[in-house]
Image (cartoon, helix red, strand yellow):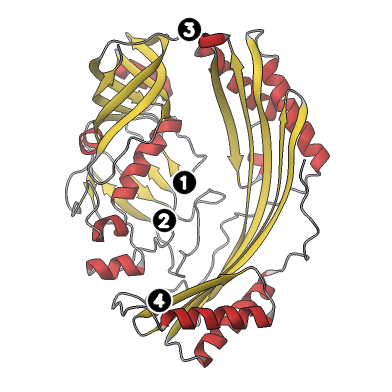
Amino acid sequence: MAIAAHEPTPMNEKDLESIIAHALSEAALRGASQAEASVGQNVGLSVGVRLGEVETLEYQRDRGLGVTVYFGGRKGSASTANFTRDAVHDTVAKACSIARFTAEDPCAGLADEALMAASVPDLDLAHPWNLAAEAAIERARACEAAALAYDPRINNSEGASLGTHRALHVYGNSHGFIGGYPTTLHSLSCAVLAGTGEQMQRDYWYTTARDWRDLQDGADVGRESARRTIARLGPRKLTTQRAPVLFAAEVARGLIGHFAAAISGTSQYRRASFLLDAVGRRVFPRGFSIGERPHIPKAVASAPFDDEGVTTKDRELIDDGMLTGYLLSSYSARKLGLVTTGNAGGAHNLVVAPTVTGGLESLLRALDRGLYVTELMGQGVNTVTGDYSRGAAGFWVENGQIQFPVAEITIAGGLSTMLAGIAAAGDDVDDRGGVRVGSLLIAEMTIAGD
């Protein structure tokens, strides 16, 4: 059990803005042509229980200031966790010293002033949970207890964990922009085991939300982790074959994540993407669309502005299967001769529009005969070449009905072919992350087994 030592009282947004103002002023005094600074603080509580006993109890309190200065095209950065005036002064001095030794880069610098966010809308991202450690422990225990009581075949546990965190982030630059907003994130998870020896199976479930009141009931989380574990008992292997593959919503998110990585500005200007120069090409099937929606209230990846202060906007990345643009920061945009899309720091809520209704059942019927994947293992994804090969577990489906669990298999293909071969996107959307997508049916992949 670990409890952090006493830390200073958390600062408010005005306090953090004054630190940034001091850093920017110091940079100007030292001759920087441009400067930017970001400051954040994070406070949290995490508890973990296993078989009813407390395994971890941690309080977190972190804070930091990052300063970047530009002398023309020369850039220097430094950071500190000390917010005193002297420490801020020294940090800026170090950043300026570093900049004097770096090479000129014509693409370096702040995002254009005209693109700065004119206002910071309230996206309802902060819902603090004043939860005492004892109450957090009891919630985790209740979650695990529900899992262990679900079925007598559940005979062990990897535990249940509860976390509640709040953060405040403020960014400012020498354009005169300064803005910040608070966020919170809460989560509850459980993982249990069933069976014995080589027949032992494990699965898990979790819930996460900006607002603690939106979390799934803890007992339901525990029971779902147990249900998923029991469903995996007695898995079979498959013979090597080619067949349709249905990615469950919780793993389909990763497939869209590979696409997002391939269209990032960094991947494009480094010429390290399987979707190189793909704007204007049909990447997904006709009728398929992906939008970026940065302003969804309470969403995990919502943000009023990006890491450079650029206002975020709704946009369509995939329209009728066609790629319309990349995910660009100001630097990657300049490298490509384009304009930033407000994606410094990443994408903000990628939303895949369903192409079919009826939930998972309709997708299983569309699959008819093939593999339903519920877990992926390993790191066999190359977003440069598009090669895809990962260990998988799930269920074999015949006549649109789940027949038996499968394990110790590998699924393989090429990402370009996989994306173009998506036969259906379900409306069973998993909204727990920065990619909101339902189950995805791939027309055909190689399944390697016996």
Q: Looking at the image, tell me whether mark 2 or mark 1 is earlier in sequence order.
A: 2
Q: CA distance from mark 3 to mark 1?
A: 34 Å
Tag 3 residue: 234
Label 4 CA crowd tier, 10 Å (few <14, some 14–19, many 20+) = many
Q: In the rendered structure, which disc, 4 or 1, sits on the residue that comes first in sequence? A: 4
Q: Badges 2 and 1: C-beta atoms under 8 Å apart?
A: yes
Viewer can see residue 257: yes
User: Which-is-in-front pick, marks 3 and 1?
Assistant: 3
The label shown at residue 346 is: 2
At label 3, the amino acid type is Gly
**Does label 2 or label 3 sit earlier along the sequence?**
3
Residue 174 in sight here:
no
Label 4's element?
A: loop
| Front position among marks 4 and 3 | 3
Q: Amino acid at mark 2?
A: Gly
Label 1: how many Cα within 10 Å (few below 14, some 14–19, many 20+): many
Question: Which element carries disc 1, helix, strand or loop?
Answer: loop
Mark 4 to mark 2 CA distance (whole Å): 17 Å
Q: Nearer the viewer, residue 237 or 18?
A: 237
Q: Residue at x 33, y 15 (%)?
A: 365
Q: Is residue 39 left or right of residue 237?
A: right
Q: Residues within 10 Å of mark 2 (few under 14, many from 20)?
A: some
Answer left or right for 165 relative to 105: right
Residue at image coords 75%, 28%: 141
Residue 97: where, in percent of width, then height? 47, 83
- Give residue 434's mark: 1
Name the residue at 20% across, 34% down. Answer: 417
In the rendered structure, which disc, 4 or 3, sits on the residue that comes first in sequence?
Answer: 4
Q: CA distance from mark 4 to mark 3?
A: 57 Å
Q: Nearer the viewer, mark 2 or mark 3?
A: 3
Q: Residue at x 31, y 52 (%)?
A: 316
